Every structure is written in C-alpha cells, then in structure tokens.
Image (cartoon, grey):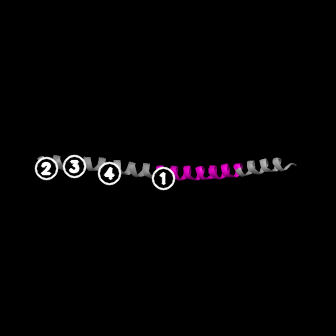
C-alpha cells in the first residue's frame, strides 16, 4: 500500500473512533435525560395530587366553618 493510502485509512479510522465516541456520549446522555424526566414526571404527579388534596381539605374546612 502507498503512504497516501495508509494516511487515508488512518484518518478514516480516527474519524470513525471519534464518531463512535460521540455516539456513546450521546446515548449515555440521552439515557440520563430519560431517567431525569421520569423522576421529574413522578414528582410532578405527586405535587399535583398534593395540591388537589389541599384544595379538597380547604374546601371541606371552609364548609365546616360556615356551618
């Protein structure tokens, strides 16, 4: 093989490794974001349920105070 061919193949291999490294980082970060979004969604649902419970409690208490 010629020197130019070896340099070309070496450059392609280096580019492939960089691309693979970036892909792994992207996939890892995507999984982290999915987990974070899942946790945030669960917390948001819990907060909404607590807000509804508070609203029902205040409405009930208000009704009791009026009677």
Tell me if label 4 and label 3 are in contact, CB under 8 Å. no
Membership of 39 in magenta stretch: no
CA gap between label 2 and label 1 equals: 43 Å
Q: Is residue 28 visible?
A: yes
Closer to the camera in the image, 9 or 58: 9
Q: Secondary structure at mark 2?
A: helix
First of labels 2, 4 by sequence position: 4
Is the residue marked by circle 4 packed among few (<14), some (14-19), or many (20+) residues within 10 Å? few
Residue bearing mark 2: 65
Residue bearing mark 4: 50
x 35%, y 51%: residue:
47
Q: Secondary structure at mark 1?
A: helix
CA gap between label 4 and label 1 equals: 21 Å
Tell me the magenta residue range.
15-37
x 19%, y 50%: residue:
61
Tell me if label 1 and label 3 are in contact, CB under 8 Å. no
Residue bearing mark 3: 58
CA gap between label 4 and label 3 equals: 12 Å
Task: Tell me: 42 left or right of 9.
Answer: left
Q: Tell me where residue 28 appears, x and y as whole percent.
A: 58, 53
Disc 2 versus disc 4: nearer the observer: 4
Majority secondary structure of the magenta segment? helix
First of labels 1, 3 by sequence position: 1
First of labels 4, 1 by sequence position: 1
x 79%, y 50%: residue:
7
Q: Is residue 67 visible?
A: no
CA gap between label 2 and label 4 equals: 22 Å
Residue bearing mark 1: 36
Is the residue marked by circle 2 packed among few (<14), some (14-19), or many (20+) residues within 10 Å? few
């Amino acid at each position: 093989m010629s020197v130019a061919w070896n340099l070309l193949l070496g450059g392609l291999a280096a580019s492939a490794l960089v691309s693979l490294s970036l892909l792994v980082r992207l996939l890892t970060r995507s999984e982290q974001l999915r987990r974070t979004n899942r946790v945030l969604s669960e917390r948001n649902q819990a907060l909404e349920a607590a807000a509804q419970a508070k609203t029902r409690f205040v409405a009930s208490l208000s009704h009791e105070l009026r009677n």
